[in-house]
Amino acid sequence: MAVIDVLKYDGPNNVLVWKWRPKDRGPHRAELSGKVREYDARQEEIRLGSQLVVNQSQQAVFVKGGQIADIFEAGTHTLSAQNLPVLSGLIGIAFGGQSPFKAEVYFFNKAVAMDNKFGLIPFNLIEPNFRVPIPVTSRGSFAVKILDVRAFLTQIIGTVPDFEAGTLKNYFRGVITEQVKTAIIKISREQNISPLELEAIVLDVSAAVKGIISETLAKYGLFLELFNIEAIPIIDEDERVQKVVADYQRLMSQDMEERMRLKRRAENLEIYKVERSFDTTEAAASNIGGGDGGGAGGILGAMVGLGMVNPLAQTMGNMMQNIPTNVAQQQQTDKLSKDEVIKLLKDLGELKAAGILTEEEFAEKKKQLLSKI
């Protein structure tokens, strides 16, 4: 009976758990004295003094009779009664540790198992604008690592010799897909989002589901390192769905055009106000002068009838006197500000519109004021 001197991980790289077994274990054929016979290789045995090699990011676990005995971290270990206290008590190692013993050895890969993908079977969401069911799906990926080898071994592994990282999605597909579906329905309703706009809540769904999945995996000794919803697309193979998508896009385009129009109007609001003020000034000047009818019509005619011409003329005269004075004073100081010039031009415009200033006088004063800017 062969006795093992070195125990080390000798499995593929894409597994989370690998159960040690000799390479030549299993049915064999041997030629003895020219005869061929089949036999089953006996389970190799271990003895104290053997070397246990545990690579980085690994743990090795000894199991005896279905019970977890001793756990070894990364490094090279010489098996002894001191570092196998539990196993020693179980098998009662005798004869100075020279007696072989049987035990199962599991190597756990504690590195992060990346890119475990999942996808949802399409389900329907009602489009609120058209009241039409839209088939929706989702896809994503997650990354895990083994945190508690005892919990993972007892609740997941059992007697399975190897456990690949890709097998995880078979174990947890149900809880992942159910939680993702529930989160999509809940969040889309809360935010009143159309099934055609679900890409906007990808991050929200990921955040909502990650906590729930993390708690579930922790019960099995796993830590959820990453959880990512990559997309929440619709299935538009049906012609009715295609029509809804086309109509929805048309409505969104019209809505965007209307929003841009309102934005441009808001940006030009000040210009609009100035234009309206000039329109109002022109209308007032027309009324003062009597409009197209001339003579004593309009506001000016009414003022003559009420004896208000002389006070008005006096007021206008004061304005005429003040304007040159203001200009002269300003010449003694710095340049006029743009707002001040505009105000004075408006005053001159009112005087010209009332017929108090001639076109030539207005042009001269205007030239003087503009030179001050």
Image: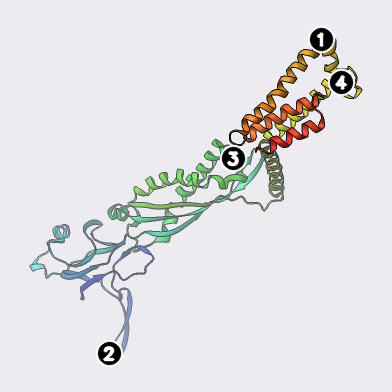
Res 290 label? 4
Q: Quadrant of the C terminus?
A: top right
CA gap between label 1 and label 2 equals 149 Å
Provide the residue designation for mark 1: 307
Q: Are marks 3 and 2 in contact (CB under 8 Å)?
A: no
Mark 1 secondary-structure assignment: loop
Circle 2: residue type: Ser
Res 193 label? 3
Residue at the spot x=17%, y=60% of the render? 87
Of pointers 1 and 3, the one earlier in the residue sequence: 3
Circle 3: residue type: Ile
Q: In this image, 226 relative to 85: left or right?
A: right
User: Picture coordinates of residue 38 (x, y %)?
Assistant: 32, 79
Residue at the spot x=22%, y=64% of the render? 103
Of pointers 1 and 2, the one earlier in the residue sequence: 2
Of pointers 3 and 4, the one earlier in the residue sequence: 3
Of pointers 2 and 4, the one earlier in the residue sequence: 2
Q: Are marks 1 and 3 in contact (CB under 8 Å)?
A: no
CA gap between label 4 and label 1 equals 17 Å
In the picture as drawn, the residue positioned furthest to the left comes out as 96
Residue at the spot x=85%, y=18% of the render? 298
Of pointers 3 and 2, the one earlier in the residue sequence: 2
Q: In this image, 218 relative to 122: left or right?
A: left
Mark 1, mark 2: which one is toward the viewer?
1
Q: In this image, 19 relative to 229: left or right?
A: left
Mark 4 secondary-structure assignment: loop
Provide the residue designation for mark 2: 33
Circle 4: residue type: Gly
CA gap between label 3 and label 4 equals 61 Å
Does residue 327 appear in the picture of this structure?
A: yes
CA gap between label 2 and label 4 equals 138 Å
